[in-house]
Amino acid sequence: MGLELLERPQRIAEILEETRTRGYAIRDKDWGGDYSKNKKEFDDGLGAIAVPILSGRKVLGCVNLVWISKLFNSDQIAKLHVSRLQVAARKISTLA
């Protein structure tokens, strides 16, 4: 994962569809935090979720939350924090 993803447009489309369906993004389990190395070579030990800041259908940016992945999984974090991230993103979008 990383720069090699640029050569996989079908996977990019899948990730975007999964994210739209879920309503928020989850850091890919194969991403270790370095564009030039795979997760076996480099793992920063982080997890992340993000929600979009929208203006109509245009994505202006995102609000994200990053944590130490060995402490919580993405489902636990999402259950606790996605709704608050979405509220924050909506409030920010009104300023656009």
Image (spheres, rainbow, N blue to C red):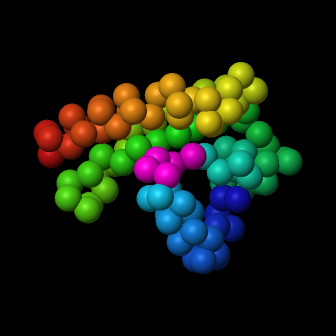
Question: Can residue 42 be seen here?
Answer: yes
Q: Is residue 41 left or right of residue 10?
A: right
Q: Is residue 59 magenta?
A: no
Measuring 50% from the left and 63% from the top, which residue is drawn there?
Answer: 16
Q: Position of residue 39 (x, y in %)?
A: 79, 48
Measuring 20% from the left and 58% from the top, which residue is drawn there?
Answer: 56
Residue farthest toward the right in the current orientation of the protein:
40
Q: Would you identify the image quadrant in which residue 63 lies?
A: top left
Q: Position of residue 62 (x, y in %)?
A: 37, 44
Measuring 30% from the left and 46% from the top, which residue is drawn there?
Answer: 53
Q: Is residue 61 left or right of residue 31?
A: left
Q: Position of residue 68 (x, y in %)?
A: 67, 26
**For the N terminus, which image quadrant?**
bottom right
| Closer-to-camera residue (50/23) | 23
Question: Can residue 34 be seen here?
Answer: no
| Closer-to-camera residue (41/22) | 22
Q: Would you identify the image quadrant in which residue 84 lies?
A: top left
**For the C terminus, which image quadrant?**
top left
| Closer-to-camera residue (61/36) | 61
Q: Position of residue 94 (x, y in %)?
A: 14, 41
Q: Is residue 71 left or right of residue 56?
A: right
Measuring 36% from the left and 48% from the top, which residue is drawn there?
Answer: 52
Give the residues drawn in magenta, as a range: 22-26
